[in-house]
Amino acid sequence: MKMPHRYGCARSREAFDSECGSGITSVPVIDWTRAGGKATRDRARRAILAGLCAIAAACATSSATSFARMNEEGRRLVSQQRWEEALRVSQSALAKCDQTDWCRKDPQYQGLFHNTIGEAQEHLGRRDLAMQHYRAAFYAFPLHFTENYFRLLKEAGMYRLLRSEIDVKLASNEAAYRSATALWLPNESSACGGRWVAGTYSWRLRAAGGPSGKVVVSQSGCTLSADFASPESPAAGRPLRLQANIGTGTATVLYGLPCVATDKGQFVLERKGFTVNAERTAFTAGCPQGPYVIEFARD
């Protein structure tokens, strides 16, 4: 007697009839190789679809629209005074932004997320953390995120840092500089008139054959300074350093060898620059004396 096939019956109809009997005229034929290939293809198709979905999801969460939506959600929670939720949403948004190349370099989104985090931290009583995020927002986009940062600096009595931040970060925009100075440093603003004088100037001594050249004028608050020449190699008759104050209108011009002098004078703003009217009072043999004028024209 023949033993049945190990799967129960033979795979072909003829073998089935001979091994299992001819009482059954037909059986389903199963192609195991083809079935296995189909399963493999199905798994591969599902893997590809899963990968495409993951890519689409990643693109969806790193688009400008998605970051705008996250910012709106954070601002909505702030407006509802739901500080913990606003903090959580904005911290998550900032983390995703930092992981996305274009967003990490975008000053607007960096400033928006840091500013919202700062507001939440401040209302949760964490002013030090709030200051850090307000500062990050200001450094990301100085012309837009000034109010909260400057307010905390002023409330903390940190006027020197406030003055420095205004001078350094807003120097390139005279309108923003004047506005910030008038709003946050009103006493100093009234003294200086909100004038920004720093820059590169061409200068000349108003006299026949007088020295001339170029100089960079720096400004900190109301105080101006400029270095004309290196102290190690001064030229005869050429000033070494200028110091002036916009508020008081005073000026001091320092000279090196061979005509060492510290001349006092008056600082006068002009339409395209400024002038310094000074006078040499100390007598030095072979050196000029009396009043003189140095003109500065902005390049």
Image (cartoon, helix red, strand yellow):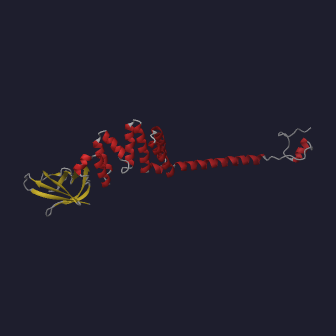
Q: Quadrant of the N terminus?
A: top right
- At 39% across and 46% down in the image, what residue appears? 137
- The residue closer to the viewer here, 234 or 121, is 121
Q: Residue furthest bottom?
A: 208
- The residue closer to the viewer here, 156 or 56, is 156
Q: Position of residue 80 (x, y in %)?
A: 46, 41
Residue 288 at least partly seen: no
Q: On the picture, is 219 further left or further right than 259?
A: right
Q: Residue furthest front?
A: 80
Q: Position of residue 291 (x, y in %)?
A: 11, 57
Q: Position of residue 217 (x, y in %)?
A: 24, 54
- The residue closer to the viewer here, 63 or 156, is 156
- At 48% across and 42% down in the image, what residue appears? 89
Callout count? 0
- The residue closer to the viewer here, 42 or 143, is 143
Q: Determine the image quadrant of residue 208.
A: bottom left
Q: Residue furthest top?
A: 125
Q: On the picture, is 114 further left or further right than 49?
A: left
Q: Quadrant of the C terminus?
A: bottom left
Q: On the picture, is 258 further left or further right than 166?
A: left
Q: Position of residue 131 (x, y in %)?
A: 37, 40
Residue 149 at least partly seen: yes
- At 47% across and 44% down in the image, what residue appears? 76
